[in-house]
Amino acid sequence: MAEIVLGIGCTHTPQLHTPAALWDIRARRDAEDGVPLWYRGRRMTYAEVATERSHQDLAAQTSLAIRETRLEKSHRAIGALADVFAEVDPDVTVIFGNDQNEIFLDDLKPAFTIMGAVEFENMPRTEDQVERLPPGIALSDTGHLPDAGTILMPGHPALAGHIAAECSAAGFDVAFSRRQVRADPARAQTSGMPHAYGFVYKQLFRDRPVAHVPVDTNTFFPPNQPSVRRCLGFGSAVGKAIHSWSEALRVAVIASGGLSHFVVDEDFDRDIMAAMARNDFAHLATYDEGYFQAGSSEIKSWIVAGGAMQASGLAGEIVDYQPLYRTVAGTGSSAAFMLWR
């Protein structure tokens, strides 16, 4: 039987691979009229968030020196996670991530997708794709796209198919593909994999060929975002499927994304990490679904991964946490890094 031997939770925010001095490109976008932000379960304008948080004196945390220090610590944490991954050297890895209009567009957005291709391609964007990106995003492509050419990552079609079958039997209607899912080239932001997976390839796999199964959850886009409880149940079904696999595989589980953004909420993030470290997943469901919207919805990828690890006996630990503030309203991204081993 297969065994889950390692768990990793890692932020993949573009801020991690944007020079700290250039965070203001996105900061200006945050402050534009009409840009919706979510903070503590409520949809708010930038001005409303700034007023709500005026007593926190966040301006002191947006200096270039603090930005660069927190960025450096975040990169050290990513390196530590990659070192552990290389040391454990699992046979196959299951990556829990999400798509953001990269391969699933308005014509189809499955709630859960299991990908069982023989191999997956990651490649640089075309010039046309770069032009379709929001301001400042292309600066971070070095974090999740190859520097040149195409990187091929092996899949594990047999395990992927087994997980899909077992999850279907458990009552989850999953989408499944034996080919790499690609969007219409005329509308796509990428020709390769979504950044949630490309980040893992480059930062944690270090572009080494690692057999893996991408498992995608539609965390971002209404109307079919799975609830926290549904994500936990799905993750549990994936974990049971892995453990029921007949081959003696050593499996790693990686959650890619999160935690709170585009408004950073340190108290919320630390509570989430503490609950996951002690395997108290019931606590996560005490938060209203409004807490898991926009970028913060990626916490659900961590919840799915946590559900998969429930029966593994692995112990959780917080490697590091850095709030990457870019405005006085507290917009930006949190950088969270955890291990289960």
Image (cartoon, grey):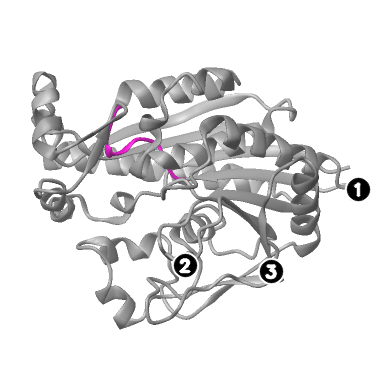
| Amino acid marked by disc 1 | Ser
Asked if residue 283 is positioned above or below residue 43 in the image, the reply reads: above
* Residue bearing the label numbered 1: 246
Q: State how far apart marks 3 and 1 are (Cα).
A: 20 Å
Quadrant showing the N terminus: top right
Does residue 77 show up?
A: no
| Left or right: residue 86 compared with residue 141 | right
Question: Is residue 222 shown left or right of residue 52?
Answer: right
Q: Main secondary structure of the magenta part?
A: loop
Q: Which residue in the structure is indicated by mark 2? A: 107
From the viewer's side, name the closer residue of 30 and 143: 30
Mark on residue 117? Answer: 3
Closer to the N terminus: mark 3 or mark 1?
3
The secondary element bearing badge 2 is classed as: loop
Q: Work out whether residue 57 or residue 91 is closer to the camera in this orientation and state it.
A: 57
Marks 2 and 1: which is nearer the front? 2
